[in-house]
Amino acid sequence: MKITQNIKEVLKTLKRRKPAKIYCPRCGSPNIHLSSGFDYWLTPKKYVCEDCGYVGPIVMELEKEEKTKTS
């Protein structure tokens, strides 16, 4: 089935995906981290920016684009 093939392709890319670099949505700083160790597994994620003081569940992610060969 075509749907099954599409799902398999998505799962393959998720397995190989490297963690993306995260940035503060307010100031764009990379100095952002989870507020505590419990935020990842016990409570919803909450991030804290060291530069502007942002506290919240939203961060920006930056992924490297894959280069494609051109003939």
Image: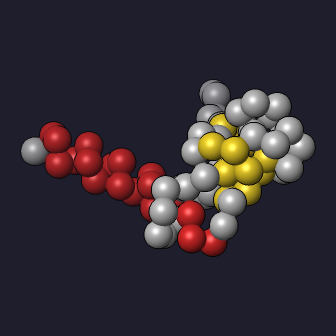
Is 54 left or right of 68, judged from the image as shown? right
Q: Nearer the viewer, residue 22 or 26?
A: 26
| Residue at image location 63% in from the left, 72% down from the top | 37
> In the current view of this chain or complex, which residue is farthest to the left?
1
Whether residue 33 is visible to the viewer of this picture, yes or no, is: yes
Colour scheme of the picture: secondary structure
> Picture quarter containing residue 23?
top right
Against 48, is 60 above or below? above
Quadrant of the frame with the N terminus: top left
- Where does the image place residue 14, in percent across and percent down from the top left? 45, 55
| Residue at image location 26% in from the left, 43% down from the top | 6
Whether residue 66 is visible to the viewer of this picture, yes or no, is: no
Q: Nearer the viewer, residue 28 or 53?
A: 53
- Where does the image place residue 71, in percent across and percent down from the top left? 63, 27
- Where does the image place residue 55, in percent across and percent down from the top left? 69, 44
Is 14 left or right of 34, judged from the image as shown? left
- Where does the image place residue 52, in percent across and percent down from the top left? 86, 38
Task: Count all numbered tags in the image, as a single digit.
Answer: 0
Against 3, is 37 above or below? below
> Picture quarter containing residue 68?
top right
| Residue at image location 89% in from the left, 43% down from the top | 51
